[in-house]
Structures are given as C-alpha cells and as structure tokens.
Image: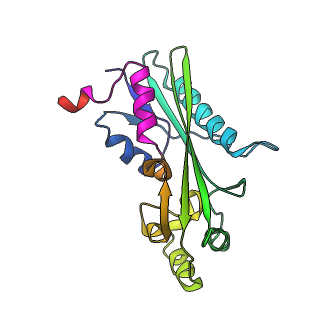
C-alpha cells in the first residue's frame, strides 16, 4: 500500500481515519489559517485543506505518498466561527449558536504525485436553546477551546445539538465518505483493507 499521511495534529481526525482501517502516519504543519479578504467560507476551508495536503506532500519527500489535508469551520450567517481564543469568545460563540441553525463546512484534499483533489462537505446543524448556566459550565470544562465554533459534537457539546443534516464525521473534522472516495479515486479503495 502507498504510504498515507494525515497532515493534521488533530486527534479527532486521526481517530476518524483509523475507522477506515488504514495504516497512516500523521504530520503537524504550520499553515497560516487567516481567511483572505472577502473569502467565502467554502473557499476558505477548501483552500486550507489543499494547502495542508500539498505542504504535507512536499515535506514528506516520498513520491508514492498520498497526503490528506482537511479543514473545518463553523459558519453562522456567512461568518466563520474559528476556534475561540479565550473563554469569553467561546461563551459569545455559543450564545450566537443557541437556538439557531448553522453550517459546518469541511474541506478535504488528497495530494500525491501530480494530483491534488479537493472536495467540500456541508452539514446543517441545529442547536437547541442553551441556558446561560450550561454555556458557562461547558466553557468551564475547557472543551470549547480547540474546537471550531467553540463546541465538540463528539463530546459534551453533543448535548446542544438538536438535529444534523449531512455528515456527522464531517462535523467532527473528517468526512469519511468523501475521504474514502478520494482514496479510491487514487487507487486505494479502503474496503480492500477490511478483509485482511
């Protein structure tokens, strides 16, 4: 099998990729994640996914390697809610999301010799109305601090979610359906590794 590299330090993305039954290594990259002036959220996440995959491929120095890059943003009213930089920012994000529907956009890119394919997953997420006390208690756990939009659906933040339409794994950080399709298109159908 070709070497597969996940260009991410996210333990959540690594855990999701492990669900596909593949052997892979991870690589942390330092990519500027500042949105461009007037850049649409979908363009932003796909650009970052591409930049991570291409930078990872170049850094790996293995011609046969396939490098996955991914980026996830929570989008409310066409505004990107990144990772909160403070407890106060996390509280403000959760107050904004309370009782409302937002989008989680995840870009996924696969780079290899002479290729870089990029796909976008958009999931609609609806929050129930959150009480001020539960927002404060959630922020006290520290869970919001490294999560786009200030919540983790796979953790305690899952208690806030009333409904999702789309990919659960994309909300966590790596849409498995798209990832499997990209790998299959590159000659690595994941199901072949389930048998062994």
Q: Give the left or right position of residue 196, taking residue 92 as reference.
A: left
Q: Position of residue 138 (x, y in %)?
A: 51, 76
Q: Give the left or right position of residue 12, taking residue 92 as reference.
A: left
Q: Give the left or right position of residue 155, taking residue 146 as reference.
A: left
Q: Is residue 179 magenta?
A: yes
Q: Position of residue 122 (x, y in %)?
A: 56, 46
Q: Residue at x 52, y 78 (%)?
A: 140
Instruction: Report the magenta residues as a range.
Output: 174-192
Q: Is residue 184 magenta?
A: yes
Q: Quadrant of the N terminus?
A: top left
Q: Give the left or right position of residue 40, taking residue 28 as reference.
A: right
Above-or-below relation of 60 to 71: above
Q: Residue furthest left?
A: 196
Q: How is the image coloured?
A: rainbow
Q: Position of residue 192 (x, y in %)?
A: 25, 26
Q: Residue at x 57, y 81 (%)?
A: 136
Q: Residue at x 56, y 83 (%)?
A: 131
């Amino acid at each position: 099998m070709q070497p597969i590299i996940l260009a991410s330090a996210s333990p959540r993305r690594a855990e999701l990729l492990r669900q596909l039954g593949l052997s892979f290594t991870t690589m942390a990259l330092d990519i500027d994640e500042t949105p461009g002036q007037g850049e649409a959220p979908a363009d932003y996440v796909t650009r970052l996914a591409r930049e991570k995959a291409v930078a990872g491929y170049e850094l790996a120095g293995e011609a046969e390697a396939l490098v996955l890059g991914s980026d996830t943003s929570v989008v409310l009213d066409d505004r990107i809610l990144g990772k909160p930089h403070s407890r106060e920012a996390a509280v403000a994000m959760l107050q904004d999301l309370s009782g409302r529907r937002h989008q989680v956009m995840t870009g996924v890119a696969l780079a290899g010799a002479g290729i870089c394919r990029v796909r976008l997953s958009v999931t609609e997420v609806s929050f129930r109305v959150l009480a001020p006390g539960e927002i404060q208690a959630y922020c006290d756990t520290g869970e919001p601090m490294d999560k786009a939009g200030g919540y983790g659906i796979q953790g305690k933040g899952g208690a806030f979610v009333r409904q999702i339409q789309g990919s659960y794994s994309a909300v966590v950080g790596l849409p498995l359906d798209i990832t499997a399709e990209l790998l299959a298109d590159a000659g690595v159908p994941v199901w072949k590794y389930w048998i062994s």
